[in-house]
Image (tube, rainbow, N blue to C red):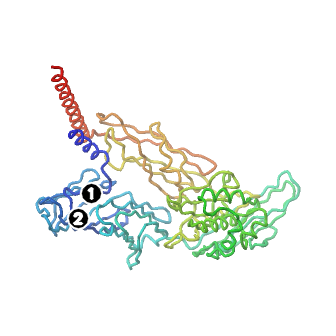
């Protein structure tokens, strides 16, 4: 049994060794500070200070290691001000302090600096930092990480980092958090003014003379200055303050027009104006639903109660009772009622007003939906479209999963103001179609490796996709070597025009552990803009190496197991032989 335990321990060490862990040769007490600087080339320059105290039963501590998810570069290590040897094995830093070990009950100070890539991606208007944190032993408050971002990266637009604090200096931002915590940060410079240049066309086919109206963006969303508006007969305001361009068409008449101007978005919150929810919160009991139930049950009860209005608009109501008397509810009604009910049930919920496409439609509409906090984090939920189309619109929430939306710069997720990347696509109506110029998909896909490739080991394979077209797209399917890649790696990735994303491709390997040489990887990535699809073929020639270290270890492990089995079998045979005598 002793030998079997040793074999299992070796097996666990080989296959279950954690990433981002600091591993000491002997047990010690230690604390650390980490400073991460985001460099102009999107590399992370990491400086770590460790204070180690040897409180173990061992006389000396003479080495330790750090495992990283990608191979570091430019590694330098010092102990008590003197440089010490460093060895890099793939994504592991091994530090040798045997020339100056830490003696029993003594303290040693070690400083390490290195660079890693793959944690920062830049888009057209903003940069994303996705830092996973370190897994360190000991008390959490003894390990602190500070991420420094220079002011040339822009303003802090969004921060999702548990227990973090932000300080602003003359040089930029410093985000401090426990080293074990991850951080998702968005920095950027949002243009203050956008040009509007939209063309619309309405064809009154096969019906008598008819009145049409084209809804214009609400002024609560920003300042719109129209330079010219052609093709319309007149404009007017409806009962709820929504602006429309109105026109009357004869039977079989086709008419074109343009809307040209500028838009300056407001940077404040847009909906609701009354953040306390006013009458909505006060009248939530009038819904007569069980607010102590699970969120899924509350959601179902509300969907059974409400009816989506086909008269689409961002009209405001004065409360739940007033909304219900109309018989049908608009998107903002759904958002306000759901938010009031969820709040009363203790579920954090925010309202988003922005631009999105509806299923089966190409054009964008002003719309209102929700952000709801669950055990898995914030998700977006669109109860209006859920009810209208009969299927769930719920998706995990990250900024790039909301097409054309960038988050406001506030510490918490509140009622979010939005910034549109392409206002030319916002003028739309259910009774009109618009021919926006140069709307086409043009996508490139490229496979690449982030580290050496070994046989019988999952390849460090990534896919870089770039949207060279003029419409937002999402990835529909990825297939490499006949294997479809797990959709959770890309399902909620939206690419705005001009943006690039890197997606990890997991589970692809060459099974033969003795294969070395060239190998051609082939596959494809399929994109969609919601209506049309486009396929980009993928191929990559790679040089495969045999992982002799792993092969030798596995062979040794196999021999140990065979020897153990042979010893056990021999003992059993000897025992049986003695008994038979």
* Disc 2 packing (10 Å; few <14; some 14–19; many ≥20): some
Above-or-below relation of 196 to 540: below
Q: Residue at x 30, y 65 (%)?
A: 46
Q: Foreground: 348 or 422?
A: 348
In the image, 307: left or right of 46? right
Disc 2 is placed on an element classified as: strand
Q: Residue at x 29, y 45 (%)?
A: 12
Which residue is under mark 2? Answer: 29
In the image, 416: left or right of 29? right
Disc 1 is placed on an element classified as: strand
Above-or-below relation of 3 to 444: above
Which residue is under mark 1? Answer: 66
**Between marks 1 and 2 in the image, the one whose residue lies nearer the viewer:** 2
Q: Residue 288: x and y, percent?
A: 70, 64
Q: Foreground: 185 or 473?
A: 185
Q: Foreground: 63 or 341?
A: 341
In the image, 62: left or right of 296? left
Q: Residue 229: x and y, percent?
A: 74, 69
Q: Residue furthest top?
A: 581
* Disc 1 packing (10 Å; few <14; some 14–19; many ≥20): some
Above-or-below relation of 238 to 574: below
Q: Residue at x 62, y 51 (%)?
A: 530
- Residues under numbered marks 1 and 2 in contact, where contact means CB atoms less than 8 Å apart: no
Distance in Å between CA atoms under marks 1 and 2:
16 Å
Disc tally is 2
Q: Give the quadrant of residue 274.
A: bottom right
Q: Residue 4: x and y, percent?
A: 24, 39
On residue 275, the disc is: none
Q: Earlier in the sequence, mark 1 or mark 2?
A: 2
């Amino acid at each position: 049994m002793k030998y079997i335990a040793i074999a299992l321990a070796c097996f666990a060490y080989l296959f279950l060794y954690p990433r981002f862990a600091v591993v000491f040769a002997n047990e010690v007490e230690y604390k650390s500070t980490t400073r991460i600087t985001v460099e102009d080339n999107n590399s992370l320059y990491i400086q770590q200070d460790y204070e180690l105290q040897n409180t173990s039963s061992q006389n000396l501590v003479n080495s330790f290691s750090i495992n990283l998810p990608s191979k570091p570069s430019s590694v330098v290590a010092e102990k008590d001000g003197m440089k010490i040897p460093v060895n890099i094995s793939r994504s592991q830093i091994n530090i040798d302090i045997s020339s100056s070990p830490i003696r029993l009950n003594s303290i040693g100070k070690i400083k390490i600096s290195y660079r890693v890539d793959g944690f920062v991606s830049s888009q057209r208007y903003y940069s994303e930092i996705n830092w996973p944190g370190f897994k360190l032993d000991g008390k959490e408050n003894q390990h602190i990480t500070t991420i420094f971002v220079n002011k040339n990266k822009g303003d802090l637009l969004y921060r999702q980092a548990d227990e973090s604090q932000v300080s602003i200096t003359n040089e930029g931002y410093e985000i401090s958090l426990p080293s074990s915590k991850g951080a998702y940060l968005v920095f950027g410079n949002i243009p203050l003014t956008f040009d509007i240049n939209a063309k619309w066309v309405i064809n009154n086919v096969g019906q008598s003379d008819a009145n049409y109206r084209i809804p214009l963006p609400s002024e609560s969303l920003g300042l719109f200055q129209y330079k010219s508006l052609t093709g319309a007969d007149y404009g007017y305001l409806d009962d709820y303050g929504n602006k429309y361009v109105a026109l009357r068409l004869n039977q079989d008449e086709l008419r074109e027009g343009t809307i040209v101007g500028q838009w300056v978005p407001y940077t404040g919150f847009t909906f609701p104006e009354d953040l306390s929810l006013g009458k909505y919160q006060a009248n939530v009991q009038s819904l007569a639903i069980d607010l102590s139930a699970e969120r899924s049950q509350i959601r179902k009860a509300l969907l059974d109660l409400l009816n989506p209005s086909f008269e689409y608009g961002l009209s405001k109501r004065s409360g739940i009772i007033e909304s219900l008397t109309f018989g049908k509810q608009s998107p903002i009604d759904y958002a306000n009622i759901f938010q009031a009910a969820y709040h009363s049930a203790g579920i954090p919920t925010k309202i988003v007003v922005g631009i999105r496409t509806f299923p089966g439609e190409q054009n964008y509409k002003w719309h209102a939906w929700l952000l709801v906090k669950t055990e898995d984090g914030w998700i977006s939920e669109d109860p209006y479209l859920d009810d209208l189309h009969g299927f769930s619109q719920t998706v995990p929430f990250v900024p790039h999963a909301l097409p054309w939306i960038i988050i406001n710069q506030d510490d918490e997720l509140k009622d979010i103001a939005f910034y549109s990347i392409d206002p030319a696509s916002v003028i739309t109506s259910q009774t009109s179609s618009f021919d926006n110029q140069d709307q086409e998909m043009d996508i490139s896909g490229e496979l690449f490796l982030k580290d050496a490739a070994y046989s019988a080991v999952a390849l460090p394979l990534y896919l870089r996709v770039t949207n060279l077209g003029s419409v937002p797209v999402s990835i529909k399917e990825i297939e490499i070597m006949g294997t479809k890649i797990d959709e959770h790696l890309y399902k909620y990735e939206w690419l705005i025009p001009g943006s690039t994303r890197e997606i990890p491709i997991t589970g692809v390997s060459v099974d033969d552990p003795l294969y070395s040489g060239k190998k051609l990887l082939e596959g494809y990535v399929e994109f969609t803009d919601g209506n049309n699809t486009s396929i980009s073929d993928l191929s990559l020639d790679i040089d495969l190496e045999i992982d002799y270290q792993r092969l030798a270890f596995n062979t040794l492990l196999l021999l140990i197991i065979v020897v153990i089995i042979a010893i056990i079998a021999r003992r059993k045979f000897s025992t049986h032989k003695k008994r038979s005598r």
